[in-house]
Image: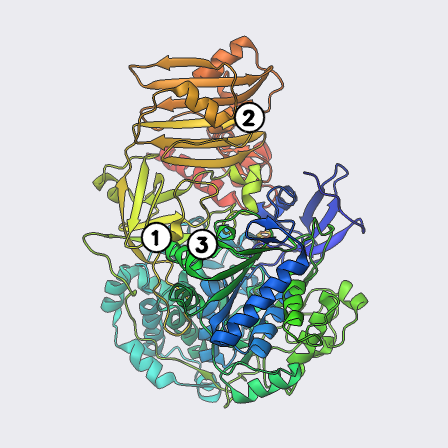
Amino acid sequence: MLVTPREPLETKTTCPYCGVGCGLVVRPSGTGGVTVSGDESHPANLGRLCSKGSALSETIGLEGRLLYPMVGGRRTGWTEALDLVAGKLADTIKRHGPDSVGFYVSGQFLTEDYYVANKLMKGFIGSANIDTNSRLCMASAVAGHKRAFGADTVPGTYADLELADLVVLVGSNLAWCHPVLFQRLAAAKAAQPHMRLVVIDPRRTMTAEAADLHLPLAPGSDVALFNGLLAHLEAGGHVDRAFVDGHTSGAPPALATARKQDLTAVAAATGLEIDNLKIFYDLFTRTERVVTAFSQGVNQSSSGTDKTNAIINCHLFTGRIGKPGMGPFSITGQPNAMGGREVGGLANQLAAHMDIEDPEHRRIVGGFWHAPRMADRPGLKAVDLFRAAHEGKVKAIWIAGTNPVDSMPNADFVRAALHACPFVVVSDVVRDTDTTRTADVLLPAAAWGEKDGTVTNSERRVSRQRAFLPLPGEAKPDWWIFAEVGKRLGWTNAFAYQNAAEVFAEHAELSGVENSGRRDFDISPLAGISRDEYEVMQPFQWPLHAKPVAGAPDVRLFSNGSFYTRDKRARLVPTPFKAPASATSPEFPLVLNTGRVRDQWHTMTRTARSPRLMGHIAEPFAELHPDDAAARGISPASLVEIVSAQGRVIVRAQISPGQRRGSVFAPLHWTDRQASNARVDALTGSHVDPISGQPELKFTPVEVRLFTAAWYGFAVLDREPRQIDAGYWVVAKAEDGCRVELADRRAVVDWHAFARDLFGINTELLAYHDTAGKRHRLAAFDGDRLAGALFVAPEPVALSRTWLAAQLGLPAITAKDRLRLLAGRTGNAADDPGPILCACLGVGLNQINRAITDDGCTTVEAVGEKTRAGTNCGSCRSEIRKMIDAKALQNAV
Ligand code: SF4
């Protein structure tokens, strides 16, 4: 369905995906949709975009949208739905107390949405049982910052990554997960050949491919690595004594802890060679301008807070913080994880970077809100919130803008918790997710492109998200929905906002109350901002000391050596190394590491709508080391079961020497909407960091087994499948329909009936059967056009998926070509682009291979000139580089 952009003709807004926070310019396409390009004036991206940002225009249609409130599966109006939600909350609170209700919100929220939901729960309902999916993303960084700095402060800016002489990336696949930031880093490195990049990651990721040194440490051993670095710095006398003495405390106990592991012990804990440890330690020691950037590989751990502090300790000890090109740098996953932190989005925070456990802070916030019932202690963090719902302690839960049945650890337990909870409200933009299926009430929320507000990126830069589409159906902004419930609960004045600008103005005002530099977060010059000023507000970094002006210099914190602790000193924190919370066993001998792939976002509710993005990786997979695969009889493209103590999934095997022996990587994106059994978070456990409450998503003991099917299939069809009667299936959108991977242990008796059910067609099929060889090929035509084709074999079907999917778009297929299609043969090998590698420009793997092999391209630029691959967003450049290197190696042996 096409959408009609509203005036004005050009809208500046912000990307809704990752924490880089790229600025966008959206314009009507002239054909009923929009075009999206990078905003050259936005300081985060300076016009760049990655493949996901470039494909945003393909994701804004209304297919699958939740457009009306629903109660018990029945469409209703806002009045009935809101009255019911408010009535149930009021009744539950009255009978069981404020802590019997909970909200679980999202890093996809705009800051204004977050602010109102938090105000309602913490100031008026009187509980702090509001947590966010950002708990899964960066809670350990928050806890580490607060221990070290006295506040949740990210000191640096993106420019520091370009100004550094050494960038250390820890647990961060920046090339795939924050591609524009990686492009900035790669460009800076190309311009400054002396610059060094060290990547610390158990897996040889695309980011590691670009590194000067890759340290594939044992999962969960980062604390040992950085303790070793701290001890090395001390042993060599590489300390900024004036800074440590004048601006920090806690160095002696932190050093005493670090010294307990000598180099041999560090090597044993990390699995790294002593020589490589020395190279890294010496590089860090002799390079003054060092940025250590970290992400989910650090945070999603039962020792995530200690990992953060072990990194910060090394920067404090050397005084490398608050100066250009230096500092620890937490890079958030979600677009507004930082904005959520600013308004107290986590269950253990208060608004404006205040602490719920501090009575003074409760007084300030409660007084400002005129709150009748301030929460006086932290609420339940995400894992505990769903556990409490399972145990019947939380009796009403409201989930907004997130899909915990797929994204929470131990996801089957979370689904059971929601089924057990007496009252579940879900506000979302999507009608059918694995979480909306558990809801009593569904509330239609505005989507990206329809809502106004602000987001804050990883470098503390606040940007406007602006609506360029009308609200469809009866969808409403999240802040409005929470405010309406607040009014119905009796707090009419406190929630009488007319628009997002009024919410922002109040949020800005609160940040300045009794602040005077005591708290890091201060945007009070924007208190009382008018709606018109808000409309044209330019991106700015906090803290603000005056109204922001365009082109202002970057704001770096701690350059004066003053921190937000009571004595203004930063803390070095002792970080004793602890092994992950769970351990491998003979039953579960491998370690599962979960993460993202380049072109997908979270549970794919948006990105799965784009055929271009689905063309990169269309099927869930498990990446295994060749030795682990061989020991289990697993060959490339086999199907495998991954089994843990919590659950089981079936995915495709990928075998890669870049995977650490004993480890398995699986992406987190697929849900029951796209696959039969690929919810990877059904495998992960509920262990959390004891300080931050962040789950250990990077370390789950598992076993991987070959899944031997009686048959394997691949189909393309020009519509959604009607019925899939197979134990294994995955559906992915293609340009003119969809593609389906299939397999089953059960034999199929009637392939014609199977294909008709799959295609949703009752016409005659063109078919080829090799019954003895168990090979079957069936195709259906709608006039001259292909409507569906199914290929079945006793082993994984080896056919070009891209070529077959492209046949759906042909206006006519001749009789001869129909037979060729049934044979699964591309007429000319040059016709087959192969799987899409460059999502922006639709360039396939085979095309790039031909440029390297046949045309002799030996650089990424040459491949770009020949094929255009990698010339737009650049997200695929690392993959092209890897292919060139592999070819060069092949030629050399
Ligand atoms: Fe969006 Fe890509 Fe920029 Fe992240 S790097 S904000 S996903 S365009």
Choose top left, top right, bottom left or bottom right for residue 528. Answer: bottom right
- The tally of labels here is 3
Does the beta carbon at disc 1 come under 8 Å from ligand 1?
Answer: no
Residue for point 73% across, 68% down: 501
Q: Amino acid at mark 3?
A: Val
Asked whether, in this view, residue 603 is left or right of residue 9, the answer is left
Residue for point 18% across, 53% down: 586
| Along the line of sight, the residue nearer the viewer: 513 or 365 | 365
Residue 765 in the image, given as x and y percentages of width and height: 48, 15
- Spatial separation of the CA atoms under disc 1 and disc 2: 35 Å
Choose the circle earlier in sequence order: 1 or 3. Answer: 3
Choose top left, top right, bottom left or bottom right for residue 712. Answer: top left
Residue 597 in the image, given as x and y percentages of width and height: 47, 47
Question: What kind of colouring is applied to the model shown?
Answer: rainbow
Residue for point 39% across, 80% down: 573
SS of the residue at dot 3?
helix
Mark 3 crowd level (few <14, some 14–19, many ≥20, 10 Å Cα): many
Residue under label 2: 806
- The image shows residue 128, relative to residue 243, as above or below, that is above
Residue under label 1: 683
Mark 2 crowd level (few <14, some 14–19, many ≥20, 10 Å Cα): some
